[in-house]
Image (spheres, grey):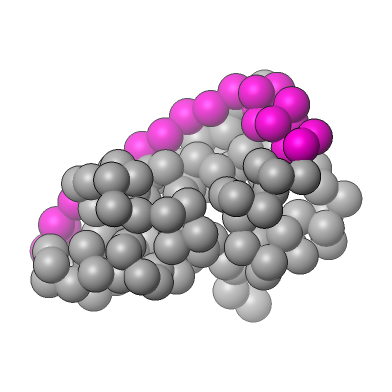
Amino acid sequence: MVIGTGIDIIEVERVKKAAEKPAFLRTVFTPAEQAYFERFGFEPQTIAGTFAAKEATAKALSVGFRGIQWTDIEVLHDENGKPFAKLQNGALSRLRELAGKTVHVSISHIKQLAVAQAIVED
């Protein structure tokens, strides 16, 4: 059963400018996410898609980032390249409060925009 859904869309250029500052990458993304970006040459669309997935996941948890740090939601990829959200700390606590078990994430982007959807299921 679906417990929560979230969607986010962001302009790639906005994230590209923010990513020029190392503090943005360190604050928002985990080392594993940054390593993934490095594999793709820090492509702005990839960074923006991951950012949107974090936002969408926070919305699906029905709290935004109240009580959750950016790095509490880690967007990783399985062996086929499919994204998934790994939750920890505040985000994991919120998932448990909702009696959720799974967070599904989908990411898409074009040159100018990135969009992501997250679904929390029990």
Q: In the image, which residues are magenta?
A: 1-21
Q: Position of residue 43 (x, y in %)?
A: 80, 43
Q: Position of residue 53 (x, y in %)?
A: 47, 48
Say if the magenta span includes residue 10: yes
Q: Is residue 110 visible?
A: no
Left or right of 108 on screen, residue 91: left
Q: Residue furthest right?
A: 41
Location of residue 91 (image quadrant): bottom left
Up-down relation of residue 111 to residue 28 (above or below): above
Viewer-nearest residue: 97 or 111: 97
Q: Residue at x 42, y 42 (%)?
A: 55
- From the top left corner, tell me how far across and down residue 26 is, in percent: 67, 53
Residue 114 among those drawn in magenta: no
Q: Position of residue 44 (x, y in %)?
A: 75, 37
Q: Residue shown at 55%/43% (left/top)?
A: 51
Q: Residue at x 57, y 49 (%)?
A: 28
- Can residue 40 be seen here? yes
